[in-house]
Amino acid sequence: MPEDGDIGSRSSHAWPQVIQGGMGVGVSGWRLARAVAERGHLGVVSGSLLDTVFVRRLQDGDPGGHMRLAMAHFPLPAVAAAAERDHFREGGRAAGEPYKLLTVHGLDVSAEREALTMLAGFCEVWLAREGHQGLVGMNLLTKAALPNAAFLYGAMLAGVHVILMGAGIPRDVPAALDALAEGREARLKLDVDSGPLDDAWVRFDPARHFGADVPKLERPRFLAIVSSHLLAGVLAKKASGRVDGFVVEHHIAGGHNAPPREGAHDANGEPVYGERDVVDLAKMRGLGLPFWLAGGTGSPEAVRDALAAGAAGVQVGSLFAFSDESGIEPSLKRAVLAAVVRGELEVHTDPLASPTGYPFKVARWP
């Protein structure tokens, strides 16, 4: 086992103080993750719809050749060749030409579609890791379960150091990571409301793609994203395998938020959070696992306060989302920042914006 504070057997890095948020779709791309990792912190790529992002980059002509460079290192060359044949457009799409769409994931996804998802996860992590010895993670939404096992395996093939998952209860993920590292079939629970699929599992078997030559891989560390010390305690004790730490999100954090425990909403429809939604940091410390605080933590003072409270550091999203390296379209970044300067930006916690069913932060400006 690694020594306390060690990220894993492949690396002598201690846990970083800053985790860059894994924001999708395409916001936390490989360029942003690489830039953060090169500076000694944890750079994180988003797995949200990464397969679609990947094939659209190819259809846009793969500017700079980055996707094809990573594809050349994928351990299943026939998969990379098929992706290039089916999606790469020299010079990009014609004006007005729509993107070629992927079929959606299902419980009975084809081997070819599953392999493309693996390839997308591999390329994003491979590019984020290229040229430095820093730490790279991948963030996935627990609720978006259907493609997650294939993304995880692709990321592991590229040597991802850390997996971070929230927007749900990632109880099954640690065992899935164990299985994938050992070359066995992994299972992730599919949450459904009712009906014949109320006990459905997403299954992923590396042997489907590698046959008898399934590689043994390094198991990445796993950080669960939580907003409750109670949930952290349950995962620490009753998850399917080893949980290595937690990201503790305050309800002012961007992206997805947990619903308020009292279920209250104000006149504008925003969730109202109360004392029961405050995380007890003493109980977090009592779990004996590292944790990072998230939500309004993008300042030196917040980092000092987090360390003083016993945290290993902070996770920061919005500051990175509006950095030069993020995947948000530059003119949109400029418009938002200008609205902030003018005092015209409103951040609304919308209970209906996300298909996960979790409240989600939405920015509004004139």
Image (tube, grey):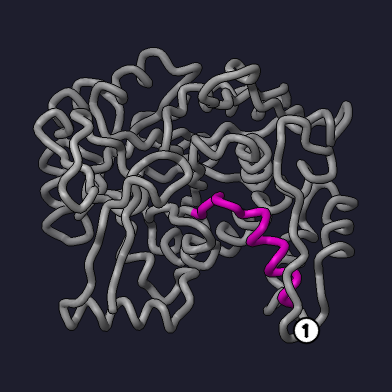
Q: Choose top left, top right, bottom left or bottom right for residue 228.
A: top left
Task: Identify which residue is drawn at 37% across, 40% down.
Answer: 358
Percent across and percent down for residue 304 are 13, 51
Magenta stretch holds residue 319? no
Report whether 94 appears left or right of 280.
right
Of 359 and 286, nearer the camera is: 359
Answer yes or no: is residue 117 visible.
Answer: yes
Percent across and percent down for residue 77 are 87, 52
Point out the stretch of residues depicted in magenta: 45-61
Q: Is residue 298 above or below residue 205?
A: below
Report whether 51 appears left or right of 311.
right
Percent across and percent down for residue 73 are 77, 56
Give the residue type that dot 1 points to: Ala
Answer yes or no: is residue 18 visible.
Answer: no
Q: Secondary structure at mark 1?
A: loop
Task: Identify which residue is drawn at 88% across, 30% down.
Answer: 211
- Quadrant location, the C terminus: bottom left
Q: Where is mark 1, residue-wise? A: 94
Q: Residue at the far top: name it.
A: 238
Of 185 and 105, nearer the camera is: 105
Q: Choose top left, top right, bottom left or bottom right for residue 160.
A: top right
